[in-house]
Image (cartoon, helix red, strand yellow):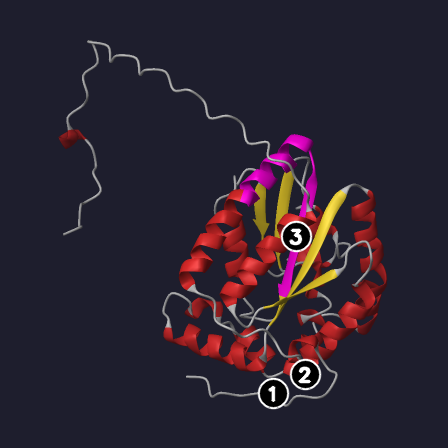
Amino acid sequence: MLPVMTAKKQPGTSLEEAPQATGKVDTAWYEREVARLQVELVKQQEYIRARGLRVVVVFEGRDAAGKGGAIQRITETLNPRAARVVALAAPTERERGQWYFQRYVAHLPTRGEMVLFDRSWYNRAGVERVMGFCTDEEYEEFLHSCPEFERMLVRSGITLVKYWFSVSDTEQEKRFQKRLQDPTKRWKLSPMDLEARNRWVDFSRAKDAMFAATDIPEAPWWVVEADVKKRARVNVMTHLLAQVPYEDLTPEPPVLPPRPPVTDDYVRPPKESQHLVPDVVP
């Protein structure tokens, strides 16, 4: 197992060092509230579709901050044809030779669609900056051009919502340890995650510089206190509903007519002629 390592805190280095709401959330209440919010998100999606709106939601934060879990709760009841999750891998050689924002532009929504970026163009201000995957000139150009890029998106009619999931070093370490113990989650820990774990303060400074340059009125950063996953999920779902005001345009349920009778000339093939999945349930 990984040894527990707590980064030395330095005053004024990062928002996630501020005290967070840490009270536990009642599980029964949480499940009821998530179910209620998911119904509202379906209504919001129908409004977005009917009005031809275009919505982009950016999820950023440290490793194990809870971005993926929040995205899952938001999207699991939505129509996947109109709500897409974009989680891009490292850029290819061709993409590295393109305008930096080009590969993200290809995934922007069309009319009536919502796109959720599980990490985004802000990779350049975070992991690329800290790990040395971009030059100083490329980094400075990003901080200069990103606000203009986002203003252009907003002027074009896109609603842009940006979330930063804030997690403490202590809570992140707990989640890393749990991932190591869970075979279904061990894949979430990459060598890059482990290296980032050793550079807590560097990432804090990079995030602070990113906020200073890109927290613009047209597309502000919204910080989600994420040390308590259930609290963070309810808060971000509630907040997202308020970012795109909507009306309930849920259509009336269709009336199902009686099923037509099966014609007498149909004969179902015998099961023995088919390849059946074995029934292993006791």
Q: Nearer the viewer, mark 2 or mark 3?
A: 3
Q: Give me the residue at 58% from left, 73% from top.
A: 21
User: In the rendered structure, which amino acid carries the disc numbered 2?
Assistant: Val
Residue 256 picture quarter: top left
Dot 3 lies on which element? Answer: strand
Q: Give me the residue at 63% from left, 79% from top.
A: 19
**Cα–Cα gap, marks 1 and 2:** 7 Å
For marks 1 and 3, the one nearer the N-term is: 1
The answer to whether one can see residue 87 in this image is no
Q: In the rendered view, does 267 fall on the left or right side of 197?
A: left
Dot 2 lies on which element? Answer: helix
Q: Which residues are magenta?
A: 40-60
Whether tag 1 and tag 2 are in contact, CB under 8 A, the answer is yes
Q: Badge 3: how crowded within 10 Å, few (<14), some, or many (20+)?
A: some
Q: Mark 3 — residue?
A: 57
Q: Give me the residue at 36% from left, 69% from top.
A: 183
Q: Mark 1 — residue?
A: 7
Q: What is the quadrant of the N terminus in the image? A: bottom left
Q: Which mark is residue 201?
A: 2
Residue 246 picture quarter: top right
